[in-house]
Image (spheres, rainbow, N blue to C red):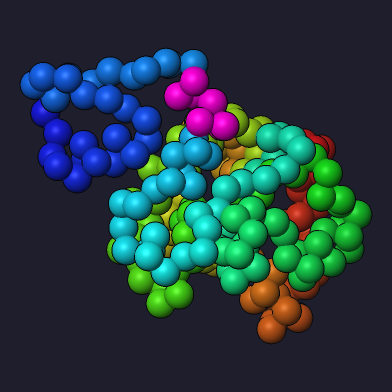
């Protein structure tokens, strides 16, 4: 199989090595398929221009992989810490749904802060995100906001799918509102909390 220069660089950044005729090998299959190894590759990634404007590439966090919360891109706080963590706003809504953050895993599709919200970078970072999901193999995935839904579901009809539970790879998947959007649209609070409660049996 042959690869473009871009594809070779993407694979190299994710831990692969190459020999003659673009034949692909791995140093250690088990090591490559570990979250620890993936996070090391994310932290050192320099495949796009965002590496020049970030403080740190951001990796996921959590004490369990059963339920994964997915956000679009890092905020200023996570850019400084290098760790994806729930906002105070989301924690407040989780408390209203009688859900603690224990048992949850938090991650971004885009691993570097995207200050100008340029969509072209998501195609690069999405390779890391998809491998992350394959490695941790969660029972339930929740995505926040319309942009996350469009990427994961490859579908533009967010309003008609929000709150529904679907199959994504080997996981159940539910798109819902972003908590910061609900802060600005409080009439959607009840619907948002109702969505969050659907994960309670999977934590």
Image quadrant where one finds the C terminus? top right
Residue 72 location, x and y as percent? Answer: 52, 61
Residue 177: percent from left, percent from top: 64, 66
Position of residue 16 measured from the top left corner of the image (x, y, whole percent) = 32, 27
Residue 197 seen by the camera: yes
**Camera-side residue: 156 or 74?**
74
Q: Nearer the viewer, residue 22 or 66?
A: 22
34 or 162, nearer to the observer: 34
**Residue 144: % across, % down:** 60, 60
**Vertical placement of 136 versus 128: above or below?**
above
The answer to whether residue 168 is visible is no
Residue 32 lies in the magenta-colored region: yes
Residue at 74% across, 35% down: 64
Say which of 14 and 131 sits in front.
14
Farthest residue to the left: give it.
21
Q: Residue at x 14, y 34 (%)?
A: 3
| Residue sitting at x 53%, y 39% | 39
Tell me if residue 191 is in the magenta stretch.
Answer: no
Region in magenta: 31-37
Q: Residue at x 76, y 48 (%)?
A: 198
Query: Going by the image, does 11 lie left or right of 125?
Result: left
């Amino acid at each position: 199989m042959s690869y473009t220069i871009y594809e070779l660089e993407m694979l190299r950044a994710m831990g692969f090595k190459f020999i003659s005729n673009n034949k692909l090998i791995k140093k250690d299959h088990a090591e490559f398929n570990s979250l620890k190894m993936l996070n090391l590759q994310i932290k050192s990634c320099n495949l796009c221009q965002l590496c020049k404007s970030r403080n740190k590439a951001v990796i996921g966090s959590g004490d369990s992989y059963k339920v994964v919360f997915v956000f679009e891109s890092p905020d200023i706080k996570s850019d400084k810490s290098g760790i994806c963590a729930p906002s105070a706003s989301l924690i407040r809504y989780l408390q209203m749904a009688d859900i603690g953050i224990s048992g949850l895993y938090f991650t971004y599709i885009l691993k570097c802060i995207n200050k100008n919200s340029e969509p072209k970078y998501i195609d690069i970072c999405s390779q890391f995100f998809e491998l992350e999901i394959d490695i941790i193999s969660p029972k339930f995935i929740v995505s926040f906001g319309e942009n996350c839904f469009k990427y994961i579901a490859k579908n533009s009809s967010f309003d008609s799918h929000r709150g529904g539970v679907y199959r994504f790879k080997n996981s159940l998947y539910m798109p819902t509102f972003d908590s910061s959007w609900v802060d600005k649209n409080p009439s959607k609070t009840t619907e948002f909390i109702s969505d969050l409660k659907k994960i309670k049996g999977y934590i």
